[in-house]
Every structure is written in structure tokens, then in C-alpha cells.
Amino acid sequence: MKKGRLIVISGPSGVGKGTVVKSLMERDPQVRLSVSATTRPMRPNEIDGVHYFFISHEKFEEMIAQDLFLEHAQYVGNRYGTPEDAVNRMLEEGYDVILEIEVQGGLQVMKRRPDAISIFIVAPSFEILGGRLRGRGDTDEEKVLMRLQQARMEYLVAPQYQYIVVNDRLEDAVSDVQSILRAESLRTKHQQHLLKEAL
Amino acid sequence: MKKGRLIVISGPSGVGKGTVVKSLMERDPQVRLSVSATTRPMRPNEIDGVHYFFISHEKFEEMIAQDLFLEHAQYVGNRYGTPEDAVNRMLEEGYDVILEIEVQGGLQVMKRRPDAISIFIVAPSFEILGGRLRGRGDTDEEKVLMRLQQARMEYLVAPQYQYIVVNDRLEDAVSDVQSILRAESLRTKHQQHLLKEAL
């Protein structure tokens, strides 16, 4: 069985990462989403082990100490991390595993797993990003401006990702991600078996 | 106007490179095929400037001396080369330019133009390649074996190409090349303009 690929997808809040990832998984059954661990409280609509693994601060610290996270980060007072063993299991089973994470964690993964495919998703413009944030019902203008400021910082990290995809029309963005995954599988390093007859 | 990309496509005789390239150009009007110069005699069905630029040995030598070739190679006693200015003109006009050349020339282009996208096309197996060579009406078995021997040598150079595409079903091979071209355009180095708002 061919091992799957590790795929890091990041992008600012409001850009529609989740929708792109969801649509990608609908099109490609080979793709799975990694489930993060978090210390933040479970919300009413959430299921433990599906949306997140909800764990205590103590457990989180313990997992860091044991180096069990592929990446971990802090966000608005809560901690988020990707348990490495669950990811490795899916990869071994041949699934492409998506980590939908913020840039802090994205950089950690790229360093720890240089083979990871990294994609940063941007909005067509900051104006459109702002519009999307406001359209989500987030009417607190100060929060919107803070998210846009956060996005600006994230864009400064984006050049460290391998690919940049614009989420203008969802269908196009998903096709672009699919093209990236297909092209990456055609890279010579993954196709060596095709040349073995010559030896 | 955005500059086009230089695309090197190589692969053994009989693999169907020409068909892949033709089909790609039918699907994508942004793609143009480079016309080579050659010292071999023009065949009845050929048009000068369309299939090749037919030039003398003296002219060919002169162009080498003036460093006017992007690449040049010798094949069964005749010389073949890609005039660089014609390619550059098409690139400036925004076209993606395909060089359908053998590996000798392919390596020269990769060295001279490190930005070139390089794709090596293989057959599903040597058996199938042999079958295709025989199916072309090339009934001289010794010639077929010589071409297969040549293919073996070319496969040893293939790891120096960026991508390897199998030409099993033509449609799939063309889609694969399209995915590569799309993914390459999404590489961060080509998408920097999308991040400039953050600065």
C-alpha cells in the first residue's frame, strides 16, 4: 500500500479554508482531515474525537513533554495541537491527511516533516476578506479589524508555504488544490518505480 | 502581460509525446510548440518554418558559434536545435512554450533555463512501448530493439526531470500535464503579487 501525503492548509480567518477542505474531501475519498486536540471547552454542537479531542491543560502539557504533537500552538488563551500518532496511522493506511492549521503550527510541521505539501489560501483581496468576516454575522467591527490585522501577519509568513491558492470561486480553489496534489504525485521522486525497468 | 513558461517534454520514441503535446495544445490555447532548426532534408509532407526550420550544416555551425541555440543535439547524423530568440518572443507574448526534445537537449535547457518545467513521458511498460513501436508499421525488429535500447538509456536520464507522466490513456496523460502546469503556476514564487496587500 502506498503511503499517503501530509498536507498543510493554512490561511486567514474568513478565507473559507474549512469549506475548501470539506469540498475537497467530498470529491476525493483518499483525503482525510486530521483531528486536533484542544484545551478549549467543548461547544454544544461538537463531538469529542470528531471536531476535536477535548483534553485538559495538564494532559496537553504532558503530551508536549512526551513530544507527541506534530505541531501545537496557542490561540486566544487556548491550546491546539495535532497528535502525531493518529496522523501517522492514517498516512500508513494510504490516506492523504490534511492539517487545517494556523501558520504557527504550519511552520512547525514543515520543519518536522519536510515532505509535507504546504498550501496557503488567500482571499482575492483584503476588502473581500473583510466582507466575508462581516457576512459571517460577526458584526463587532473591532473584532473584524483585529482579524484583518492577524491576516496581514499571516500573509507575511505565507511565502514559506509551497503553494498559494486564491479562494475566489470555491470550485476553482478546490480544483487548484486537486491539481497541486496530482502534480505532487507526478514528481520524479514519487515516480522512480516507473523507471526501474531500465535498470 | 504575464510571461509564459518554458516546458521541456521528453520521452522515448514511440511513447506518444507528439500526441500528448498536440492534444494539450487543442485544450489550452495558451500553449505553443517551439519549432526546431534541423540540417536533415525536408520530407515531401513538411513545411519549412512549420515542422522545422530547414537549414544547412554551415548555417547550423554559425548559429552554434553565435550561441543562438537554447539547446542543440545530433541524432542519426543530423543536427537539431532550438533557436532561442523565437522561443523568447513567444514567452514574452505570454505563451507557454513546449520544447518536445530528446534528453540530450532537455538537459541543456534545464541548465541554461533553471525555471523551465521538465516532464518526462514514459510508457506503462517496455513491453507496451515495444508493441507501440511495432504497431507504427516499423516492422524491422532490429530497429525496434535499437529504439528500446535507446529508451533504456533515456530512462537513466529521466530522474533529472521534475515530473514523470505515464502515457497509458492519452486523456489521463494530458490531464496530468495540465495539472502540472496549473500547480506550477500556483507555486508561491509566482503568487507573490497576491500577498502584497499585507505589506
Image (spheres, coloured by chain):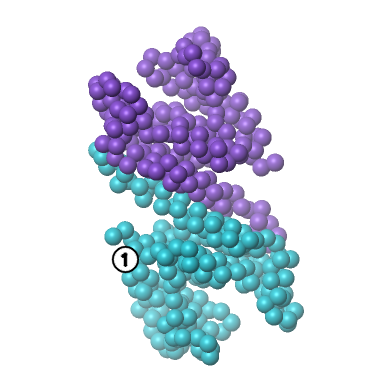
Chain colours: A purple, B cyan
Q: For the C terminus of chain A, which image quadrant?
A: bottom right
Q: For the N terminus of chain A, which image quadrant?
A: top right
Residue sitting nearer the eye, B35 or A22: A22
B82 left or right, relative to A35: left
**Can you see residue A180?**
no
Q: Residue at x 45, y 63 (%)?
A: B28
Residue B75 coordinates in the image, percent (x, y):
56, 79
Residue B56 coordinates in the image, percent (x, y):
44, 89
Q: What's the residue type where badge 1 is placed?
A: Glu
Q: Residue at x 37, y 65 (%)?
A: B95
Residue sitting nearer the eye, B10 or A64: B10
Residue sitting nearer the eye, B179 or A20: A20
Q: Secondary structure at mark 1?
A: helix
Quarter assignment of residue A77: top left
Residue A165 coordinates in the image, percent (x, y):
40, 43
Q: Residue at x 50, y 53 (%)?
A: B179
**Can you see residue B120?**
yes
B130 left or right, relative to A85: right
Q: Mark 1 = which residue? A: B92
Quarter assignment of residue A13: top left
